[in-house]
Amino acid sequence: MIATITRWRSRVFLSIPRKLKISFNLQDTTEVDFNGRGTAGHVSASDLRDDPERLPLGGLDAWMWARDPKGKQGKRDGVKRACAVKGYERITETATSLPQTRLVYVADREADMIALMVRAQQLDTPVDWPIRSPHDRALPEGARLWSAASEGKPIGEIAFTMGSRHGAKAREVRQHV
């Protein structure tokens, strides 16, 4: 099984054009409830690799597991949130072999960003990652997060219509990385 996964990862890795300047590595975690009872189902997490023009370069990793029941506080453990750190580690494994390619890891909104930042620092940050924050946080020396993060030129962007959900209306979304 491990040999099969290693061969699969190698093929995906080899599919990356050697002259590619930027590679976006997108992580998403999805919960599926097969019986409608809210306590069963499974979680699927995947890491996909795209270029800036949204050309899919392949899947890099995937996991699937059964959900744990909610605890007394109505929450589950942090397994789902840990997917972002595992995905970041998989991307860093390819960083040394692609020195001319800027690797950018984009985790889903449920990602534990603190754990991701700690792990990135431990690995000497071989892969970039955006900060996703609904709050304009204060930075050292009086700066603000959004203005500091907006100083550079975007390396990629996407526009799409997000469908309505949980009482929120559909809306146009434009994201810049």
Image (cartoon, grey):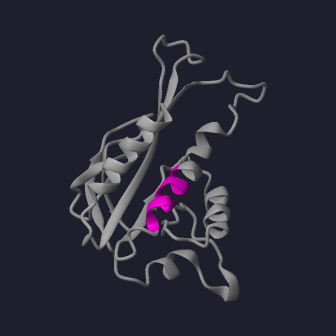
Relative placement, left or right, of 59 versus 43 is left
Q: Main secondary structure of the magenta part?
A: helix
Query: Which residue corresponds to the image point at 28% horizontal and 59% vertical from the top-left?
Result: 16
- The residue lying toward the viewer, choosing from 112 and 48, is 48
Q: Percent position (x, y) of residue 102? A: 38, 72
Return the residue found at the far right: 72
- The residue lying toward the viewer, choosing from 132 and 127, is 127
Query: Which residue corresponds to the image point at 59% horizontal and 79% vertical from the top-left?
Result: 144
Q: Is 79 part of what is drawn in magenta?
A: no
Q: Image quadrant for the C terminus?
A: bottom left
Tell me if residue 46 can be seen. no
- The residue lying toward the viewer, choosing from 136 and 16, is 16
Return the residue found at the far front: 3
Relative placement, left or right, of 116 versus 47 is right
Residue 56, compared with residue 123, is above or below; it is: above
Q: Percent position (x, y) of residue 133? A: 54, 62
Q: Percent position (x, y) of residue 147? A: 50, 81
Q: Percent position (x, y) of residue 170? A: 31, 43
The quadrant in which residue 38 appears is top right
Residue 51, compared with residue 150, is above or below; it is: above
Residue 169, compared with residue 120, is above or below; it is: above
Q: Is 94 part of what is drawn in magenta?
A: yes
Q: Which residues are magenta?
A: 87-95
Tell me if residue 121 can be seen. yes
Query: Which residue corresponds to the image point at 36% horizontal and 61% vertical from the top-left?
Result: 24
Relative placement, left or right, of 86 versus 170 is right
